[in-house]
Image (tube, grey):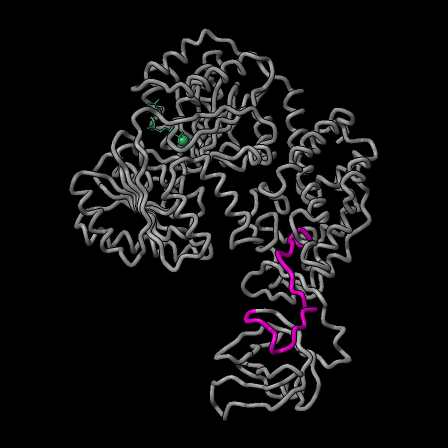
Amino acid sequence: MRPPVLDPLFAPVSTLPGIGPKIAKLVSALVGSQPDRDATVADLLFHLPHSLIDRRHRPGIAYSENGDIVTLDVIVGRHMAPPGSSRAPYRISAHDDTGEITFVFFHPRRDWLEKTFPEGARRIVSGKVEWFHDRPQMVHPDYALAPEEAAEMPAVEPVYPLTAGLTSKTLQKAVRAAVGRIPRLPEWLNDAYLHQTGWPDFAEALKTVHAPAERQDLDPDSPYLQRLAYDELLASQLALAMVRAHMRTLGGIARRPTGDLQRAVISALPFQLTDSQVGAIEEINEDLARPVRMLRLLQGDVGAGKTVVALAALAQVIETGAQGALMAPTEILARQHYASLAPLCDKAGIRLALMTGKDTQKERRARQAQIDAGEIDLVVGTHALFQGTVTFRNLGLVVVDEQHRFGVHQRLALSEKGQGVDVLVMTATPIPRTLVLTCFGDMDVSRLTGKPAGRKPIATVSVSLDRLEEIISRVGAAIAEGQKVYWVCPLVEESEKIDLAAVEDRHRVLEQVFRQKVSLVHGRMTAAEKDAAMGDFKSGTTRILVATTVIEVGVDVPDATIIVIEHAERFGLAQLHQLRGRVGRSDKTSSCVLLYKGPLGETAGARLNIMRETNDGFLIAEEDLKLRGGGEILGTRQSGTPGFRIARAEDHADLMEVARDDARLILETDPDLTSPRGTALRCLLYLFGRDAAIRLLRAG
Ligand code: ADP
Ligand code: MG
């Protein structure tokens, strides 16, 4: 049960002043932590300002720099109203001791302007100054107050990431009210550590970041942000540690088969394993042989060959008579895994089944009956499906493919599917160490370094969309030579409809130009349609596959050699790298064309440069972290560390390690969180949405 002291923070944002149902929707989309639910007061409080406006900056008109936000103390001059029906802006001149300025208003409400700016009156006006033809102007000042009202203007104003339809004034007002609702909470940090760091308490930290006095208060290393980041990291590490401890108490099963089945699978492969594949398989075999649960992360760049390692692990467990499951994030991937594993399983005598969300009730029941009867050894399916209703007779190992946000909830779901289930998580994005820790806790890690022999680096170019025709004709030449081409269109989050139109248009144009069938895959198609399209492309019936980013993870068509990524400037580095990894999967030379629409922003330009310069996924991941940390998208939620709202891997890595040790110590001394600090820590877990782990405590 959630501690009642937290209730005010878990009230919906619609209980705050100025937030009606419509605004509540916008705010929820912006700050909410759970889809389809109204954001809470806590969600809003964790939406931190990314900068501040300092209205104490009063340089005088002549000394205001272009683009600065300044506060001016002026005498209002003449009003220059546009004649009659003219659409021209309304202008008001004003001056101080240093010079003259014009205030500019579009769509003016004259009566308001006349009341607010009486000619000859003194006014305190604040807003952004722009120099235009050597004259300063201010369009729609933020404040215009009589001297006696000047105190109404905050000296320093936090600036929040916003969304269309939500004004900063509305948000500020709601946040101020939310701050007023922060209850007195028990301290969950260790006294000695608090003393050592000199951090404020949680409430003070939160209050200060929403009402910063100085710019430095919002720095990632200010005591306020450090405190909040640490709280969040501790919540996450504690939850992960609790799950891990729980899994350990459930115990694992020592699996020591002869290894014959694993050898059969490996010898069915048409290639030699790489050294690091062999190494990873050995590490996994050792884990499996121990009577504790395996919780291992298999990291390897795109195309490194993780799937066969997974299959080898599954074979080892299946030989002991247990069942295995391979979970993929998308339907396409599940089907592809099934297709590529089927011949190997067939040769080795592993009975394989595919389960997807698209199966009919009848099919599903039939499959389930086979699983219950032990007639199936290995089930391939989507994460969603697996988290749902499927049950196993004797589940031994779950492999989770390509899932970065494999959180506490999923792990709990897994631990309930069988006894002592071992878990192998595969991730393709080479996650830097700090991120591994934040997302996965202290899992054991196997890394696949290097790629299978004979792979060539992928030549990458970036080309402006203006040169689209040139690219189309090069693609034409390539398919005439028998090459295969992916053509990726981006997903614009705001509108699925626009995306669909974009990808369908591109498909139509390419079919027209090349006078041949082009395959098309996007998220709105049925599984059968996707299958058919992928099948055509794989078999070579079609030479071009136009797709949205559904192909981002894992799709494997080894003889595809060109990938064109449209609107490459909209993609993050990790995603570009993933997409590019669809090619370069054979001994043929491959290339990647990043088609961008200029002009490129600084960060987007840097991303494309990195892509051109390197194929090294680890390097790309590190650069990604740097760019996302300081880039133009600073302060928006997408730019943060996945699963975290305040802490950032690039800024708070050192805190992460402290939090991990802290969490371990907590569970050693107070495994059920019953001490006073333990009780306070329960509040912390709820606050940061990590409370699922509390269910695991005996004194839950
Ligand atoms: P990822 O690590 O991205 O999941 P996959 O497991 O899909 O990579 O493997 C990429 C491709 O490389 C597949 O076509 C697979 O059959 C092939 N492959 C895997 N291991 C080797 C190897 N040791 N030698 C040659 N090809 C391999
Ligand atoms: Mg894969």
Compare residues 631 and 414 and report the one nearer the observer: 631
Tell which quarter ligand 2 is in: top left
Q: Which residues are magenta?
A: 43-67
Q: Is residue 375 visible?
A: no
Q: Which quadrant of the structure image shows residue 652?
A: top right
Examine the rendered structure and indicate whether residue 376 appears above or below residue 678: above
Q: Is residue 440 visible?
A: yes
- Picture quarter with the C terminus: top right
- Picture quarter with the N terminus: top right
Left/right of residue 596 with respect to residue 445 in the rendered view: left
What is the x, y in percent for residue 385? Answer: 48, 34
Q: Looking at the image, which residue is at 78% across and 80% down?
A: 148
Does 44 lie within the magenta span?
Answer: yes
Examine the rendered structure and indicate whether residue 447 appears above or below residue 477: above
Q: Which quadrant of the structure image shows residue 156?
A: bottom right
Residue farthest toward the bottom in the current orientation of the protein: 84
What is the x, y in percent for residue 463? Answer: 31, 52
Examine the rendered structure and indicate whether residue 37 appears above or below residue 599: above
What is the x, y in percent for residue 564? Answer: 31, 46
